[in-house]
Image (spheres, helix red, strand yellow):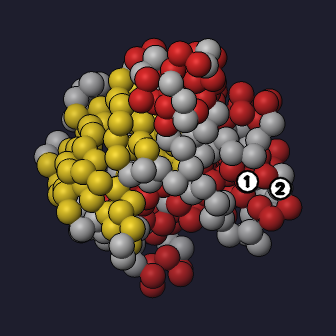
Amino acid sequence: MLRGFTHTLNSSQLKPGETQLEIRDMQLRFGGVTALFNVSLEVKQSEILAIIGPNGAGKTSLLNCISGLYKPQDGKIIYHNGRAHDITRARTHEIAHLGIARSFQNIELFKHMSVLDNLLSGCHIHMKTNLFASMFYWGPAQAEQIEQRRFVEDVIDLLEIEAIRGHTVGSLSYGLQKRVEMGRALAMKPSILLLDEPMAGMNAEEKEDMARFVLDINEEHGVTIVLIEHDMGVIMDISDRIVVLNFGQKIAEGTPDDVRRNPLVIQAYLGEDQSTFPMKHLG
């Protein structure tokens, strides 16, 4: 169990189902290319929200705006954590401090460092002692580092990576690296976890494990999950709600059953009228 994790999340003072993140009329352009056009959605506390759509639909651009990597030209992003924070123009480290962490579509780890050191790097934003105190490892600095180490050990237990804790990340399989990257995001103690294709490139067994970890993080520890994933079987099984993007616009939103039967979604994925194809193509 994550001993400090649940306590940290409870400090948000939000109840399950309350609005935790609002995106209002967001537009993102790169020169003459519109990546997102008037996208509005809400993320609820403790839900798993999936964002799906064909390649180039704007899914990763949306996560990049939420996490501060991109700055939209129009619209607002409001994060609720006891009070409302406008994070539309906030810096990435400010957003991380508020409780939003993410993993990336392309693995972004320190390949020559150990699994343990990569996870500890995720705790860095919570360190309050200065560099001088940390160098001598005494007093408050020592106590703080011990507490962060305990939290990382809990993350290691949760993701079942005890056997590889001392391994160099670059020596691990792709599937294990994806798990370590999610662990580093968890080490930031988020209340919202953004996952960009966490199961891409995995075999069936690895996907099953990752889906189980996502459910455990959400159900046992109350972390809100915003998930991009192309495996529709996984999406339909674990998501509470789904938002569908196509060419930078939101074309559908609802439960998995609602989205599965939506003709606009079927047309976006298959390019044909819904009557031509069986529903199995979408879950």
Looking at the image, how many numbered discs can be counted on the residues? 2
Q: Would you say 236 lies left or right of 22 here?
A: right
Q: Which of 139 and 268 is in front in this view?
A: 268
| Circle 2 residue | 172
Question: Amino acid under label 2?
Answer: Leu
Task: Using the image, determine if residue 127 lies above or below residue 47.
Answer: below
Q: Earlier in the sequence, mark 1 or mark 2?
A: 2
The answer to whether residue 197 of the structure is visible from this angle is yes
Quarter holding the C terminus is top right
| Circle 1 residue | 177
Marks 1 and 2 sit apart, C-alpha to C-alpha, by 6 Å
Q: Quadrant of residue 131?
A: bottom left
Q: Would you say 115 lies left or right of 68 here?
A: right
Task: Using the image, determine if residue 165 lies above or below residue 137.
Answer: above
Q: Residue furthest left?
A: 83
State if disc 2 and disc 1 touch (CB < 8 Å). Answer: yes
Q: Residue 209's x, y, as percent?
A: 71, 31
Q: Residue 45's x, y, as percent?
A: 31, 32
